[in-house]
Amino acid sequence: MFAQVIVDVAHSNVDKIFEYSCPDGLTAGARVKVPFGGRVLDGFVIGVSPASAYPAEKVKSVISVFDEAPALVPECLTLMHTVSERYRVPKAAALRLFLPSEMRLGKVREAFKNFAVFKTADVKLSAGAKKQAQALEYLAQKGEEELPALCGMFGRGAINSLAEKGALEIRKRKISRSPFEGMSGESVQRTLTPSQTAALQSVENSDKQVHLIHGVTGSGKTEIYLNIIDREIKRGKTAIFLVPEISLTPQMLSQLRSRFGGAAAILHSGLSAGERFDEWWRLRSGEAKIAIGARSAVFAPLENIGAVIMDEEHDPSYLSETAPRYSTCDVALMRAKYNGAKLILGSATPSVESYAKAADGEYNLITLTERINKKPLPEIIIADMRKEVRRGNNSAFSKALREELDATLKSGNQAIIFLNRRGYSRTVMCRDCGYVAKCKNCDVTLTYHSEDNCLKCHYCGAKYRMLSACPECGGLHVLYSGTGTQKVVADLKELFPSARILRMDNDTVSGKDGHYKILSKFARKEADILVGTQMIAKGHDFPSVTLVGILDADMSLNFSDYRSGERTFQLITQVSGRSGRADDKGKVVLQTCSPENYILRYAVNYDYNGFFGNEIAIRKATNFPPYSLICRVMVTSDDKDKALEVLKSVYFAIEELRGKYPDEFYFLNKMHSPIKKIQGKMRYQVLIRLKDAKLLEQIYDVAVKNSDNSVFVYVEENPVNLS
Ligand code: ADP
Ligand code: ZN
């Protein structure tokens, strides 16, 4: 037999299919070791055939086969080609998406434990063998026990003797390192509301493949997802449930566990390598049927998928920012098509792109306009920060927010304070000469962190000592400006000394379960106020939260990005949605310096349709997505001269393309990236706005051709981050 093998090296030089002779019985999907140019490499078998096209003496043999079941599901072999062609990455890089990295690198294996299992008490023990008699009695009662524990109780000698006599048997058994082992939520079977029932029916009856559930925050979308999953499982199918960031949703996890028990497997980066490995194999072996996780779980090793669900479909984290730069929605659709499955997108604030497709009838649109039990959406109060300053209030909190906070704390409820900046304050600036502290590697402003009294770069993590004097002019008036999460916490402590405050941002969450711990603590009401960045905006359901403060609603409005209006609307709606989800009415205080802004007006009135109508008209008039495709070709290198040379060559090739197809281009320019340097690498870009995707392949071609070991060139489609 002959095996077609892809070697596990993600480089275009070896991006081919190689043939090896192999033992009978080897199947596609298996992992093997093969000889390759004098080395031994891991490889994936993507097909087997009885004959080879090559002369026998040229074909080498597979060295060994990994003794596990084939790791890759058949679908993945098909998808691998599609992903590799669509995003122009080597096949091995596409295949890697389907395997947990720990497994590829052989860092973890299955975990085994030895158990002593009771066989018979019908054995002869010598009169003095007290320990043996006790052990036998213990085991007869319990049936079995972990071997080390048993030896600990009765001594290894006694256990060995019993084993020799045949009273017990020692068995090696595979164990599952399951995350959140002790976690259990109350399993409530809810009666669905009429809108939830209607939504379920619509998903069932529509002949469209993609369904968009647009439901206001708290309208019970989660319950709909769970019912869809339940239905597919009962049909003997499997399901993938994607959320923007799984570690941020403790309630979701416990709901899933209590509802589906061991049928649900959780895949996310916060798991230990062993846990991830075992959860992955539980899915691959069919023991678990539901994969829950963030972006990468779209590659879960499931067969016979009935539904793929993407909660908070508008979330930017669904776009991969490292190669391959895939869109989760695109991959989810590939999988849905392959399996004849339904793809369900859900959000309170659908992305303009998705909603446009629904409005055009390409997606099945399902709308839920009310919260469960007709609870009102929280009232949003606008605080005009320009007036506050005129009144002499220079603090981060408006009068309205202070009063509402006071009332909330007195009532025993909880509050969430949202702002989009980490750290103590934004920048460190010299008042005498205007010097601003920047990172040496990254050309970005540094942020002061009071916990270790230093300046940090949020792009590369570099730490710098806090300045006592200005390095430029020697002046001693070094100022902080702006407000970060840490500063807000300090100010809150002064205002409300007895309040218990938690902070959640990239600095306070670290390690496995970091998010989970902070959020669980808040959920258990061990704190009164949670201060955080956009991490806290995502999908949480804290019943006692009745106040949300949005400190600087303008922040994201001022980004120079065509999506800034959309992002601001989404953020305000999502963060506001955390308030008043249970019995008590919720409030939101939104602080801004531009209260007349139309995006804020739509947000305050929860007017998604108004927002969408306005936004889509602007996009159409200005030729922005979905009426065009933005492409950024990035050129990065340690070597500035080489990078500039390659940039020129890339630009030249694309300009030539524009010469041929002038109507396809709305915009073309080359420039420094807004952040000129990250981690020592110079960054240049060619920015393109295309009429549609017709020339996309040729643009990828240009990038691939110009990329080499010293200058890296890659393409981003409609990037979420243009820095
Ligand atoms: P969404 O995901 O749309 O923001 P959730 O699914 O979190 O909303 O639901 C909001 C709240 O309503 C949750 O506390 C949930 O437990 C509750 N809920 C959902 N469906 C029902 C129902 N049919 N009956 C009673 N409570 C429900
Ligand atoms: Zn840096």
Image (tube, rainbow, N blue to C red):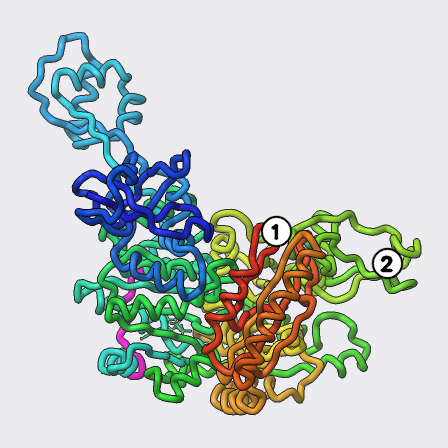
Q: Residues within 10 Å of mark 2 (few under 14, many from 20)?
A: many
> Looking at the image, is 332 positioned above or below residue 100?
below
Badge 1 amino acid: Ser
Left or right: 347 in relation to 159: right
Name which residue lies at 50% across and 87% down: 612
Q: Nearer the viewer, residue 511 or 120?
A: 511
How many numbered discs? 2
Residue at (66%, 89%) from the top-left corner? 596
Q: Picture coordinates of residue 79 (x, y %)?
A: 33, 61
* Amino acid tagged 2: Val
Residue 710's mark? 1
Residue placed furthest toward the left: 122
On screen, residue 444 above or below 567: above
**Residue 133 in the image: x percent, y percent?**
17, 17
In terms of secondary structure, where does tag 2 sit? strand
The stretch drawn in magenta includes residue 190: yes
Ligand 2, what quadrant?
A: bottom right
From the top left corner, tell me how far across and down residue 139 is, in percent.
18, 27
Q: Main secondary structure of the magenta part?
A: loop
> Visible in this render: residue 181?
no
Label 1 crowd (10 A; few <14 / some 14-19 / many >=20): few
Which residue is more in the foreground, 431 or 165?
431
Image-based side of 233 in relation to 641, left or right:
left
Question: Could you tell whether 337 is left or right of 317 in the image?
Answer: left
Range shown magenta: 185-196
Q: Which residue was labeled with disc 2?
A: 478
* Earlier sequence position, callout 2 versus callout 1: 2
How far across and how far down the image is residue 704, in percent?
51, 61
In the shown orientation, is residue 205 left or right of residue 641? left
